[in-house]
Amino acid sequence: MRKALYSFVYHRLLGWKSHVTVPHYDKCVICAAPHTSNWDLFIGKLFYGAMDKRASFMMKKEWFFFPLGLIFKAIGGIPVNRGRKSSLVEQMAQKFAESKSFNLAITPEGTRKANPEWKKGFYYIALKANVPIVLIGIDYPSKTISATKVVVPTGDFKKDIREIKLYFKEFKGKHPENFSIGNV
């Protein structure tokens, strides 16, 4: 029922398409980009739900006020206190270790504005948890979300991040001017 509802809204009502060639992983970090609009979360959750999959996501704790907080938690939201000095990498790696199935979606830019200096947390979470990174690109002009590449972190951040950024170079967000892969 859930899958049918997500699929109906994603494909029929909104007219979005999917291009998926990667296998399903019980545990993975999902690197989703470009992230240029609040709509990305909604469209992304519909995409993943239409495939009958569930993914958690981290979001700044300020968004978890009543009643929105209840909704975000129900759909997989994990509130993050970005001001506290605690290791999100360690916390999320521990969550992977304790879970039989856990997909964690992260937008590498860390903001909806152009940021060529992507956050490194998604990479180090995957490395520490020993899970693959599934690359999911959102393309608003074609109304297509693609998942066609998986990167297994090697520990060579510069090499791996270049490969990851190059994957996203052709995708256009809702506001393309707010996306940058920087110099690669």
Image: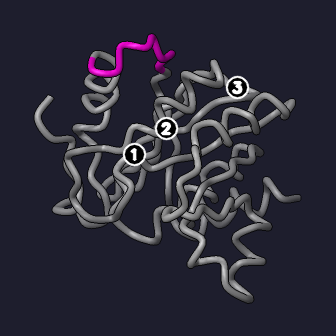
Residue located 50% across and 21% down the image: 150
Prevailing secondary structure class for the magenta stretch in the rendered image: loop
Mark 2 or mark 3, earlier in chain = 3
Q: Position of residue 68 (x, y in %)?
A: 68, 83
Mark carried by residue 129: none
Q: Secondary structure at mark 2?
A: helix
Q: Which residues are magenta?
A: 151-158
Nearest to viewer (mark 2 / mark 3): 2
Which image quadrant for residue 12? bottom right
Identify the residue at the far front of this view.
85
Does the magenta segment cover residue 63? no
The C terminus, quarter of image: top left
Mark 1 or mark 2, earlier in chain = 1
Query: Which sits in the foreground, 39 or 57?
Result: 57
Q: CA distance from mark 3 to mark 1?
A: 20 Å
Q: CA distance from mark 2 to mark 3?
A: 16 Å
Q: Which residue is mark 1?
A: 108
Residue located 45% across and 11% down the image: 154
Question: As shown in the figure, which amino acid type bears the numbered disc 1?
Answer: Pro
Would you say 105 lies left or right of 68 here? left
The answer to whether mark 1 and mark 2 are in CB contact below 8 A is: yes
* 127 lies above or below 7: above
Mark carried by residue 25: 3
Q: Position of residue 141 (x, y in %)?
A: 29, 57
Residue located 45% across and 71% down the image: 38
Mark carried by residue 122: 2
Q: Secondary structure at mark 3?
A: loop
